[in-house]
Image (tube, grey):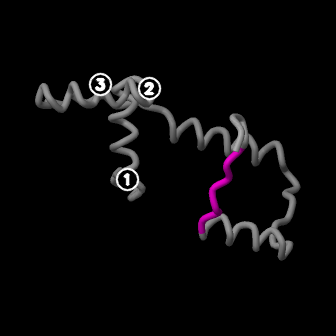
Amino acid sequence: MKKGDKVFKPIDQEEKELMESIERDEWQPVSNLEEEKEKAVAAARNTLKKDKRINLRLTQKDYYQIQIRAIEEGIPYQTLISSLVHKYLNGTLTPTA
């Protein structure tokens, strides 16, 4: 494999079901596309809007480890903490090896 070659992961069950649904022509265009787009954009904005602040006390060791992990991920440490909380609440937080 050369540098720059794309590596494709196998599709998961949800993606497989979506593809099968599309192939069965179960998807139909909407008559009010612009209105539906506006609703989707508004929902996305409301979902991503961070409007609550919290104070959190951590051990110094945990704080430094979070900062290190955030640097490795290339994101601010507060964004990393927010992402961890979000993933935990949605049941998508998976342990790493």
Q: Secondary structure at mark 1?
A: loop
- Closer to the camera: disc 1 or disc 3? 3
Q: Secondary structure at mark 3?
A: helix
Q: Residue at x 46, y 25 (%)?
A: 74
Range covered by the magenta-colored residues: 6-12
Q: Which amino acid, mark 2?
A: Ile
Any mark on residue 93, and which? 1
Q: Earlier in the sequence, mark 2 or mark 1?
A: 2
Q: Earlier in the sequence, mark 3 or mark 2?
A: 3
Residue that numbered label 3 is attached to: 67
Q: Residue at x 81, y 67 (%)?
A: 27
- Magenta highlight: main SS: loop
Task: Describe residue 20's horizontal placement relative to residue 80 as left or right.
Answer: right
Q: Which amino acid, mark 3?
A: Gln
Any mark on residue 75, and which? 2
Q: Which amino acid, mark 1?
A: Leu
